[in-house]
Amino acid sequence: MEELETDAAALEARLSRLTAPDPLTGILPSGSGTALIKWWTSADVQRQGAVAALLLTPELLGQVRITPSQGWRDPVTERIKWVTA
């Protein structure tokens, strides 16, 4: 019985995630990739940051992390790490 309750809770959580409205719907334009590129290049930094915050999560595209430097000359580009779920 306990196993069924656990399964039911997991299914309810999944259903909730699947039926939740997409937060990007109100921000990004619908249509072609060209429209999206045009929107991105003309969007202000606040809107770009909001989209990046929604997409750059371990569950979606991955989260960017910068590892600590071992020396003051270590370039950031060599210390980037992508974390995914």
Image (cartoon, rainbow, N blue to C red):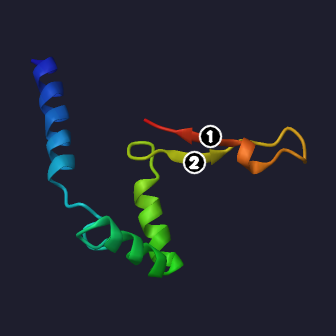
Q: Amino acid at mark 1?
A: Lys
Q: Quadrant of residue 68?
A: top right
Residue placed under numbered mark 2 in the picture: 64
Give the vertical position of 71 relative to 24 (above or below): above
Return the x and y of residue 75 as percentages of the image width and height.
80, 48
Q: CA distance from mark 2 to mark 1?
A: 6 Å
Q: Are marks 2 and 1 in contact (CB under 8 Å)?
A: yes
Quadrant assignment for the C terminus: top left
Name which residue lies at 49% across and 77% down.
46
Residue 41 is situated, as x and y percent measured from the top left of the image, at 47, 76
Question: In terms of depth relative to the viewer, which is nearer, 7 or 25?
Answer: 25
Residue at the (27%, 67%) spot, across then down: 32
Which quadrant of the figure contains the N terminus? Answer: top left
Secondary element under disc 2, as helix, strand or loop, is strand
User: Which numbered marker is on residue 81?
Assistant: 1
Mark 2 or mark 1: whose residue is earlier in sequence: 2
* Rendered residue at 23%/70% (across/down): 30
Whole-percent x, y for residue 39 in the image? 39, 77
